[in-house]
Image (spheres, helix red, strand yellow):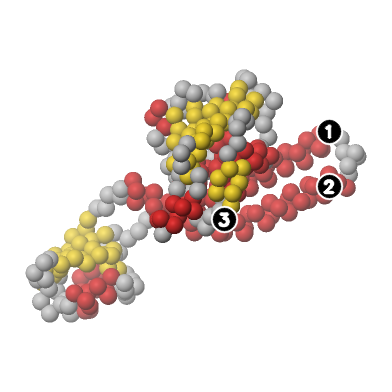
Amino acid sequence: MGLPIFIDGHNMKDLNPGDLEKAVNLPKDNFGVTHLEIFYNKTEDRLYCVLDAPNEEAIWKHHESLGLKCEFVTRVQQIKTEKGIKDEKLAILGELASDLSHNLRNPISIIQNTVDLMNIKYKGKLNHDILEQFSRISRSTVRMNMLIGDVLNFARTQPLLIEKHSISDIIRSSLDGIQVPDNIKIIMPENDVSLKCDSAKLEVVFYNILTNAIQSIGTKTTGEISIRLVKKEDEIQIDIQNSGPAIPDELLSKIFEPLFTTKEHGTGLGLPSCKNIIGQHHGTISVRNNPTTFTILLPKDITKISSIVS
């Protein structure tokens, strides 16, 4: 929780607007007072300050030490907008991202390497129960890396590495990292399309959407995930459709929002990361129901758009 917020009022006599602007950037003083914003009217005879301070008395002392007279000091309540709250959360995520990378990925790699070495060293000598425990450890390390990856992919926007790639190849590469249950059939597109893009980033997009589709269908019923590619004049349309249950209508508009998740162990950053990556490519991503279908639109040649934007 931050300090309480106050507004005060002054007469602008003998006060210079240029000097006042510097006060906003000053650190907290000896009384614990910080200027957040300073306003003055058009005729420059009235001054209003927004400050945070431990209490009202600190503000009176603050102005007394500066030789300024306050006409009033009042404490105010701040109502944070949804965007403001979201921005605060994202700023915190950005600060945590680098720590997560170093402090978690290194020990996770050690755990996975140890399991791999044990499997090699005792190959053919371990009973089924021990092998299953090793397999559970491996799956857990993969899951932890996925969660960390969600945070890092969202918090760090890196420049695109643009080259010409096959969309089908990118989709296949993303599927290589996914364990597809026997009850789910993946229907690849009948055609293929090449376009200029960052293949590694798009692989993250397909990985997230396909993983969500698999989790939606589950393991109790048979299901299908169908991927279609449609060539348009200047763009490519990619539809990823799954036979799982529909997304509740009240959640459709929220699933691309950062930190929103319906999963018990989700980060709420997978789909927002997809939206960021597609946005970097000057494309769009959307979702609709009946059946659940994610639609991605990407320009055929991002370099042409980038040159116009820049």
Could you tell whether 270 is left or right of 55 in the image? right
Q: Amino acid at mark 3?
A: Leu
The one nearer the camera, 137 or 291, is: 291
Q: Earlier in the sequence, mark 3 or mark 1?
A: 1
Residue shown at 62% from the left, 38% from the top: 168
Residue at left 25%, top 65%?
37
* Residue in the picture at 30% in, 50% down: 80
What is the x, y in percent for residue 232?
A: 47, 36
Q: Which mark is residue 118?
A: 2
- Residue pointed to by mark 3: 161
Q: Position of residue 71 (x, y in %)?
A: 11, 68
Horizontal placement of 92 versus 203: left or right? left
Q: CA distance from mark 2 to mark 3?
A: 37 Å
Q: Residue at x 49, y 33 (%)?
A: 294
Q: Viewed as shown, does residue 200 lie left or right of 289?
A: right
Q: Is residue 10 positioned above or below 131 on the image? A: below
Q: Indicate the quadrant containing the N terminus: top left, top right, bottom left or bottom right.
A: bottom left
Q: Residues within 10 Å of mark 2 (few under 14, many from 20)?
A: some
Residue 9 location, x and y as percent? 14, 66
Say what secondary structure mark 2 lies in.
Answer: helix
Q: Could you say which is closer to the camera, residue 188 or residue 152?
A: 188
Q: Toward the viewer: 297 or 249?
A: 297
**Type of amino acid under label 1:** His
Q: Nearer the viewer, mark 2 or mark 3?
A: 3
